[in-house]
Image (cartoon, helix red, strand yellow):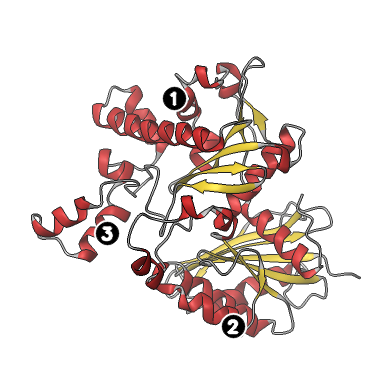
Amino acid sequence: MSSTRVLVLNSGSSSVKYQLLDMRDSSRLAAGLVERIGEETSRLEHTPLHTGGESREWTGTIADHDAALKAVSAELAKDGLGLDSPELAAIGHRVVHGGRRFTEPTVIDDAVLAEIERLIPVAPLHNPANLTGIRTAMALRPDLPQVAVFDTAFHTTMPESAARYAIDVETADAHRIRRYGFHGTSHAYVSRATAKLLGKAPEEVNVIVLHLGNGASASAVRGGRCVDTSMGLTPLEGLVMGTRSGDMDPAVIFHLMRVGGMSADEIDSLLNKKSGLIGLCGDNDMREIRRRVDEGDERAQLAFDIYIHRLKKYIGAYYAVLGKVDAVAFTAGVGENAAPVREAAVAGLEELGLAVDAELNAVRGSEPRLISPEYARVAVAVVPTDEELEIATQTYALVNGSSNLT
């Protein structure tokens, strides 16, 4: 029997998310999560999707990522889907930062591991955890192709005019300072899915993709290639996010050091963990913020207004970058589920050909759909993202020598 299954692993510092897919029809066979790795009360939740079975939950101590993947393998084996199956074609790993070198999915070897490790200074929270998951999986199945799919890869097509910061070139090059962008697997998937929704090839459309979750980013995609994106050297730049500030005057940092007496670590924590929506109103859940807005809460209203103001600025900016826009696509947790955010982001942009139909916008669903009226010159879409499928698709295409992504 030919090998058609791909296991997708997303390894965090204390967690492993996973999905097993059959690439003959892109169906999901199993999915799960191991969390609180290294703690006394670790938890594993596993769902056998191919049988429609109920989720199984296990709590106990999972000492490290090696033990976590062995536990995942044991759960998969209970369903006849173990890691030793000859039907497993490859393991695809999400890697957050690939720098400038990795522009596409890559089969992992010692040189690739060394480069991912070299990039740790620009991704200190993510790349070490990604490396741990990769090394553990390689030890469990050294005979199997292991593929790295990089969050930054989709954005490597940005021209230098978009990727460069306006600082001394020698200093920037010496320290690898440039705009890399993130959420690339989501932007790649959603831009292609939007083109498909419009009945066109990706090369025929220009799309503004708005990935709005607790982390949020925007991208301008011309003919299937990213030409600009809102996140930069790190995922801190750009839109207002759940706990991150997004764009701000860099001199704020100097001011906080000199006048506020804050250390670099304290400012890092402030901007990444205590800013954004949670810093503005104490909540980073858009559902709770909207509930408070509906009750007349002024802090929640201000937080929502700032969030929308920044979002609308990026829509306008990327409209200008692209020149012609065929669609604006909302995705991720907030983008897919928060109708008031979509309505407010597009409100007042009728002169740009953008509008939202209130009834269509209110509909909830798991399939890509248009929420703009028929007369609108620019389509507005809700396109559920599927980063795991994107990683599996890229992984399977690479190990099978195919470049077809559908």
Q: Dot 2: what SS?
A: helix
Decide if residue 166 is on the left or right side of residue 65. Answer: left
Compute the Cα span from label 2 to label 1: 47 Å
Compute the Cα span from label 3 to label 2: 33 Å
Name the residue located 84 percent from the left edge and 69 percent from the top edge. Answer: 3
Q: Nearer the viewer, residue 263 or 201?
A: 201
> Mark 3 or mark 2, which is nearer to you?
2
What amino acid is at disc 3?
Answer: Ser
Residue 95 in sight here: yes
Q: Quadrant of residue 220?
A: top right
Q: Spot the residue most to the right.
A: 1
Residue marked by disc 3: 269
Residue 124 in sight here: no
**Quarter of the image that includes the N terminus:** bottom right
Question: Horizontal and vertical percent for residue 282?
Answer: 27, 42
What amino acid is at disc 1?
Answer: Ala
Name the residue located 48 percent from the left edge and 33 percent from the top edge. Answer: 315
Question: Horizontal and vertical percent for residue 150?
Answer: 58, 63
Compute the Cα span from label 1 to label 3: 30 Å
Q: Nearer the viewer, residue 326 or 384?
A: 326
Up the image or down, 328 lies above or below 229; here it is above
Up the image or down, 26 lies above or below 194; here it is below
Name the residue located 69 percent from the left edge and 70 percent from the top edge. Answer: 91
Q: Quadrant of residue 301?
A: top left
What amino acid is at disc 2?
Answer: Ala
Q: Compare marks 1 and 3 and give the one earlier in the sequence.
A: 3
Callout 2: 10 Å neighbours few (<14), some, many (20+)? Answer: few
Name the residue located 51 percent from the left edge and 47 percent from the top edge. Answer: 228
Disc number at residue 344?
1
Residue marked by disc 2: 111
